[in-house]
């Protein structure tokens, strides 16, 4: 094997929660054959990415080496793990492997983006393996908050690597395979080189609770309700949707799913066999005709998304249904950091309608899909890997799991996006640093996060935009006055006159006095007009706006 | 008393957390003499108010009736209770009453805004009262997360009203007066007409914990640290700052306060006598010279604010000090909803430096300043008011406290901003609805939240901005081509040509074909240019930007 090596390179998902994309490679340095595990998205926010539709990892490094790429493996069907496959597939052009339910969702993404769905290959769970260059790759079932959570077992010439994907240790997950400690021990018994491990919940000190623990609490809550009951959770949390539906059914209620994602997810689960005996449901138009105290709605929008069913119901009538005084609305979910304001807005809108809003109530009505600290310890004990590489976490999570692992006597390393790790030896070693970043889907265009386009939008949002237009004749003499247009700026400032009038007067005065040299020089004119406009704004309205200067020359 | 009445009118703070402003009045309808309790601000965010400096309640209703306004009373020195006094005083022109520490801060606001500080009158606590028209008003000490929490006792011809302000029931608050149940019972013994009551923590089921409970935990943490210790909390939480400083001192560390607000708040506390025996501190330039393991910094920025000391330290060297591997950073605070991303950013930046970040640890290192549900019940039992009007809360908080109060057999009503309540009878009754809203301090200009200025900035942030400029000669014939400038839009779209080129070609083509009637009509020209530009953008980049059209006519 001489100087061949086994490498690990996160392009997304390490040092952040979202847009997972992890490269593994085997071969001589610079000639490794590669596979990619996961290819997800991150969602934009108003603070850092206004107007952006979706955020992808920048995979330029991989695209430049796509002749060395063998295959893509997807752990599970959460958007942050597979959401970019449809947009990026044409740039990579290799088969995508996943289990049935996951593959079902990937195919939809492929079709939506005009890509060949046949390139998505359904695999059976471990012990089935797929050959991919020097690798032999299997999907080992693991529990998570979606059916078919999968860890990726990668057999390499340097030994076995297990990439956990997102996981928890749930022996009663209700939907999907229970965590099977014996199977994991069996898979690990001949030695595992590296455990590349979810670190999201490393700061949660208590052992994670099973999905099965929320059912009885939810049942009690629903049984005690006297009017309509509405509950929301992530559509992909099929086990939770089932728990909610069963609670409704046991309370003698008719169940109705509302929101496209919710219906689609349940359909996919039934179609692919991961969900059986789901209570009968009625469509919203039927539900609207039933007495409200006999109804249980399960709706999208646990994060307060403006277009989801929860927010629509909060604003008023939706699909024929209006929530009223005494109805119950349950958030069987956790609010993801950054979504608080949206969720609180929905809660208060419901409150204004007299609806009783119940949140997760310190975990009574929700459990996390990720392994807590004691579970992470247990996982390390079962697998007993030579080394641990934390992933799926912000820097603080990666660092904490690294500390924890080392304290327990194992090798570990913090490897954020772009850090290429050599796993070949006894300890993980940094082999290289690779440029990574974010790509924005902006409308229908892919732009780089650092291109300055979104930065300009943020600047205008913070400072407003002033457009200054001047026309010069063939002799470079100003023709008429300077013309100003405001966007997002107050109309009147400290002098109590129209801001536009004050600006136009100041700029026209400058033009009248400007020398021939200045008037003939576009750059000079631009600089001076901009400077004067910003100063006038500063004294009139206390801020310097973004300025666009248009100099038109008749020539 | 015939048809005279006692009214309550929240102009801010009811149906939201922030910008508190509550009017009380006595007299014949439309002729009531008025007082104002609190005049605070709310802080802007990128999602709803980008570029805005501060948010005030719209007090137009009160300004139109300022001849009937007698006085302003401020409960305590939190920005959401007094932050607008300096900006608004000139529009109201009446004396502002508060206790010494609070008045100290109000005077600073007055000076900062060029207002007469002499109009701020220092009062002593209950039983001292101030006459204000038909009212006799006192400040009753109550515990909160700032020295000199104050409830306002308003004696009216219709009976006594107690406006709690923000409060908790803390019998060992460390700084400021302990909650004195006997004093409150004494004040309430002859009957209280209405308790206008903080509702913020009504969903918190456990009795609130005393400020004194965090000291031992923090001491343990600091004593166990081996390198530099840095802690942050709200500067105004003087008791907490003292607890942190004492924990540092006991661990043999030298204490240093960092951040202007922190230093100013401690100075004000000492000056006004609310704080005694605060440990000796050294300025940052001294601290920088000391061995790091002997240092305890207490810094501003518990909410991840970009310019505060915590964020500066997270980014690198600040005032000569750099945090390093193994240092400890404690958030002795709760993250206010909406600030999560900022706090998480700071945490991860510290993590990258190897700093161990500790959060409130489920309350071990932080307690709330507001009364929890059992405390609210206890307060009602002590005061035994005829009615309760919840305030200082979102709609869901007001509604929940109203429900709780009614279940316990007392009258109560949800009164959001603009709801005038008649308190004269046995039950609270809605007397009127008044227009309220938000005023933005935008640069140096006050603008209305509904003026469309900020809405335009948000639209540009979401959609980008396209400026189209065309010049027409004296005969309404286009002179040269259309000119386009992009702001916040991709440079290249689906046709792989420059977006500006494609736009200019389409618009110039339109101008060439347009009829004389269209070219002569500014409105028609504007509409058509806008329509074509937006359609071209839609097909090129998949979005319709904001468009500004400038038609210049040489005439």
Image (tube, coloured by chain):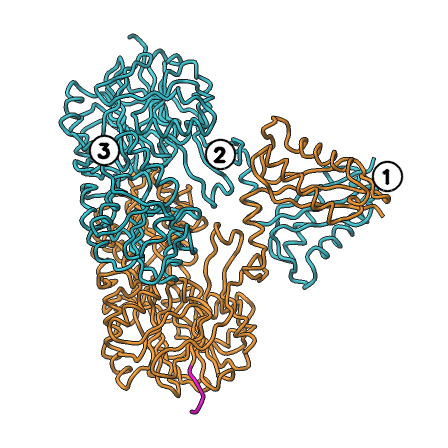
Chain colours: A cyan, B orange
Image coordinates for residue B373, horizontal then vertical, percent: 26, 65
Tell me the chief SS of the magenta region. Answer: loop
Specify the label residue A475 is tagged with.
Answer: 1
Q: Which chain carries label 1?
A: A
Residue B285 visible in the shown view: no
Specify the label residue A176 is tagged with.
Answer: 3
Above or below residue A13? Residue B339 is below
**Residue lying at 32% horizontally and 11% vertically, measured from the top left:** A4
Instruction: Classify residue A245 as left or right of residue B414.
Output: left
Instruction: Classify residue B394 as left or right of residue A270.
Output: right
User: Which is in the foreground here, disc 1 or disc 2?
Assistant: 2
Q: Is mark 1 on a helix, strand or loop?
A: loop
Q: What element carries label 2?
A: strand
Residue B365 visible in the shown view: yes
Q: Mark 3 lies on which chain?
A: A
Label 1 environment density (alpha carbons within 10 Å; few <14, some 14–19, many ≥20): few
Q: Name the residue at the left extreme.
A: A182
């Amino acid at each position: 094997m001489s100087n061949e090596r086994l490498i690990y390179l996160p392009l997304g998902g390490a040092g952040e929660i979202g847009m997972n994309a992890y490269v593994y490679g085997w071969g001589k340095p610079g000639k490794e054959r590669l596979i990619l595990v996961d290819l997800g998205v991150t969602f934009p926010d108003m603070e850092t990415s206004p107007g952006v539709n979706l955020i992808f990892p920048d995979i330029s490094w991989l695209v430049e080496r796509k002749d060395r790429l063998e295959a893509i493996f997807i752990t599970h069907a959460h958007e942050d793990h597979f959401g970019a496959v449809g947009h990026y597939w044409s740039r990579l052009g290799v088969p995508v492997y996943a289990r049935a339910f996951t593959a079902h969702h990937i195919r939809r993404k492929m079709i939506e983006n005009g890509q060949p769905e046949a390139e998505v290959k359904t695999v059976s769970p471990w012990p089935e393996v797929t050959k991919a260059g020097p690798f032999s790759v299997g999907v080992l079932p693991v529990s998570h908050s979606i059916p078919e959570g999968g860890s990726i077992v990668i057999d390499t010439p340097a030994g076995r690597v297990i990439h956990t994907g997102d996981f928890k240790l749930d022996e009663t997950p209700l939907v999907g395979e229970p965590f099977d400690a014996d199977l994991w021990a069996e898979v690990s018994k001949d030695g595992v080189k590296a455990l590349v491990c979810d670190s999201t919940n490393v700061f949660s000190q208590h052992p994670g609770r099973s999905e099965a623990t929320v059912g009885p609490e939810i049942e009690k809550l629903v049984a005690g309700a006297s009017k309509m009951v509405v509950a929301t959770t992530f559509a992909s949390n099929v086990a939770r949707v089932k728990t909610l539906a069963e609670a409704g059914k046991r309370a003698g209620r008719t169940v109705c799913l509302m929101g496209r994602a919710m219906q689609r997810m349940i359909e996919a689960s039934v179609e692919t066999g991961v969900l059986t005996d789901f209570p009968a449901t009625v469509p919203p138009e039927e539900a609207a005709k039933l007495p409200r105290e006999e109804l249980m709605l399960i709706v999208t929008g646990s994060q307060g998304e403006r277009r989801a069913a929860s927010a629509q119901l909060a604003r008023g009538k939706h699909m024929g249904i209006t929530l009223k005084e005494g109805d119950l609305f349950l958030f069987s979910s956790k609010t993801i950091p950054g979504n608080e304001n949206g969720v609180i807005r929905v809660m208060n809108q419901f409150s204004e309608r007299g609806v009783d809003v119940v949140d997760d109530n310190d975990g009574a009505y929700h459990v996390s899909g990720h392994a807590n600290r004691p579970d992470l310890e247990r996982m390390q004990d079962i697998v007993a890997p030579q080394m641990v590489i934390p992933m799926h976490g912000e820097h603080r999570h990666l660092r904490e799991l690294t500390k924890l692992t080392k304290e327990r006597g194992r090798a570990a390393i913090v490897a954020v996006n772009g850090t290429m790790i050599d796993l070949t030896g006894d300890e993980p070693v940094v082999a290289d640093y690779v440029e990574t970043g974010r790509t924005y889907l902006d409308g229908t265009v892919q732009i780089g996060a650092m291109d300055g386009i979104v930065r300009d939008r943020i600047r205008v949002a913070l400072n407003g935009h002033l457009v200054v237009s001047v026309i010069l004749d063939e002799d470079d003499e100003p023709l008429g006055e300077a013309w100003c247009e405001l966007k997002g700026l107050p109309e009147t400032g400290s002098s109590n006159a129209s801001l536009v009038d004050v600006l136009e007067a100041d700029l026209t005065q400058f033009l009248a006095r400007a020398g021939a040299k200045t008037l003939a020089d576009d750059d000079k004119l631009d600089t001076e007009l901009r400077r004067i406009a910003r100063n006038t704004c500063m004294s009139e309205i206390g801020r310097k706006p973004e300025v666009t200067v248009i100099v038109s020359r008749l020539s």
